[in-house]
Image: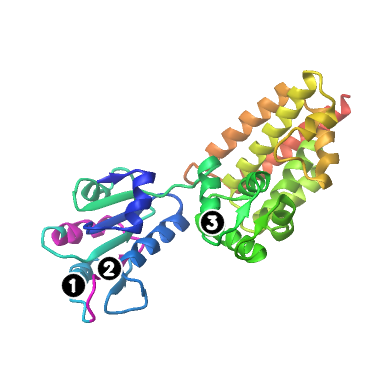
Amino acid sequence: MKLDARSAARILRDPGALRVILLHGDDTGLVRERARTAALAVAPDLDDPFRVAVLDRDAPERLEEEVFALSLTGGRRVVWVRDATDAMTAPLKHCLGQASDTLVIIEAPGLTARSRLRTLVEGHAEAAAIACYPEEGRALEASIRQMLAAEEIRIDPDALSWFAGLLGPDRAATRGEVEKLALYAGRGGQLSLDDVRACIGDAAGVSLEDAAFAATAGDRAAADTAIERALAEGTSPIAIARSLLSHLHRLRRARLAMDSGQSRTDAMRALRPPVFFKRTEAFGQALSLWTADRLMDAAEQTQSLELDCKQTGAPDLTLCRRHIARLAGTAMMLRRDR
């Protein structure tokens, strides 16, 4: 059967009578995290060789052997398969045709919608398929809150919004940054926007902000330097596109407020989260250059950039560099025409 996000969380905490959990999708970090959650629900000690067996993609012939092995110390067994392909379909089908209480957890991030393995799991009453795709927007913010709540840590709304805007599409990287915040705040602590900035000021997301602010202000040299630093730090092109899009939308909201009669200062103050004081000059420069219509055009081009970067084989790094250069070039042209 196929599970939605709400059902998935419950099943991962308590698999019940399920015999197979298949985790697939683009977010490999989320795939691994959910696999670990499901495994711990059945076998609290993942280092116990009598209850937990880990197989790789090249060992489909061992699946049946491990599924029907006895737990010498008692308790339900877990067979954890990593990087699975459709080669696992036939042995898994054979296992499902026989009685067993072993839970098979399969990590298969590369499966397509037409995969035979997905078809088998989605059509079986004792198996569940869970899609693991990158979170964004409110879903990402909810996950961050949940991770921090586990340590009884609260985070201010503007801090949460700013922090979520910096994160890329990989769950493992997100959890790493959240753990850094938790260590900074301490159990039971409270995180403000200044706290979050102080804690992750060296993160790749700051390079993204540097690139976005410099490009829209017409500082080509600074924009090029910032985007190269972000890419060198491992930031994904999709995260770059999303960061740029968020920045352009914030600029457009402020520009529309100015067009309706607000002063530039008041329009910037009204944004949530507020513009960081060290970036108000660059943000103000961009507001003086760009019209609301031009910002909308730039946002649409940035959305196209994200779609292009998702295409298999696309030169995504080159596309990002070129897009930043175009934004900076447009801002420089607007400055000359003033």
Which residue is located at x 35 percent, y 71 percent? 44
**In the foreground, 118 or 73:** 73
Q: Position of residue 97 (x, y in %)?
A: 11, 58
Mark 2 → mark 3, Cα distance in angstroms: 30 Å
Residue that sits furthest to the bottom in the current view: 72
Region of the chain picked out in magenta, as a range: 73-95
Mark closer to the observer (2, 3) = 3
Q: How is the image coloured?
A: rainbow
Q: Amino acid at mark 2?
A: Val
Mark 3 → mark 1, Cα distance in angstroms: 41 Å
**Which residue is labeled 2 in the image?**
79
Q: Position of residue 26 (x, y in %)?
A: 44, 50
Which residue is located at x 27 percent, y 79 percent? 50
**Which residue is labeled 1 in the image?**
65
10 Å crowding of disc 1: few (<14), some (14-19), many (20+): few
Task: Give residue 322's quadrant in the image.
Answer: top right
Mark closer to the observer (2, 1) = 2
